[in-house]
Image: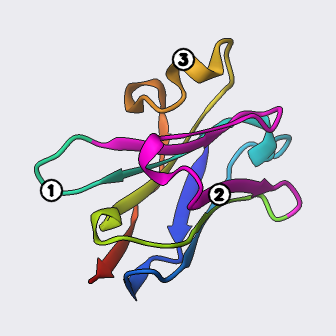
Amino acid sequence: QVHLVESGGGSVQAGGSLRLSCAASGYSSTTVGTYTMTWFRQVPGKEREGVAAIDNDGTTIYTDSVKGRFTISHDNIKNTLYLQMSSLKPEDTAMYYCAARFPRLQFMSWALSSNEYVFWGQGTPVTVSS
């Protein structure tokens, strides 16, 4: 079992920045770098959307709407996943979740799909005002 706890959400004006964190715990022999880890977001009434993912070899993928504005990274020593969000827009407002799974081939083809993940955090809210 992998336990994920997000933090760092909050309220910010458009154009501002936030850094989300996702602290992982569970299997003693593994770190965040062992897994494929992804940030998702969801607004009420809409499907959960994959925002950014990072594979165990450091490969990353982003949804088009955040490319050039968001950066996903992980720190194996702190066992934490991050999402640095810049130039935030009101449409970035959502509950943000981190998720993890053991890696498999063809990362680019499935990494932003929510049904691929079995370990989820409880979410952290982000509100961007205009």
**Disc 2 designates what residue?**
71
Measured as percent of width and height from the top left, residue 116 is found at 46, 24
Magenta part of the chain: 48-77
Q: CA distance from mark 3 to mark 2?
A: 19 Å
Q: Which mark is residue 114?
A: none
Q: Is residue 122 visible?
A: no
Q: Quadrant of residue 20?
A: bottom right
- Residue 44 drawn above or below residue 107: below
Dot 1: what SS? loop
**Disc 3 designates what residue?**
109
**Residue nearer the viewer, 38 or 27:** 38
- Residue 121 drawn above or below residue 112: below
Dot 3: what SS? helix
Image check: 57 left or right of 94?
Answer: right
Is tag 3's residue or tag 2's residue first in the polypeptide sequence? 2
Q: CA distance from mark 2 to mark 1?
A: 24 Å
Q: Quadrant of residue 77?
A: bottom right
Q: Which mark is residue 44?
A: 1
Measured as percent of width and height from the top left, residue 11 is found at 37, 86
Is tag 3's residue or tag 1's residue first in the polypeptide sequence? 1
Q: Is residue 41 visible?
A: yes
Residue 54 belongs to magenta span: yes
How many marks are shown on the rendered structure?
3
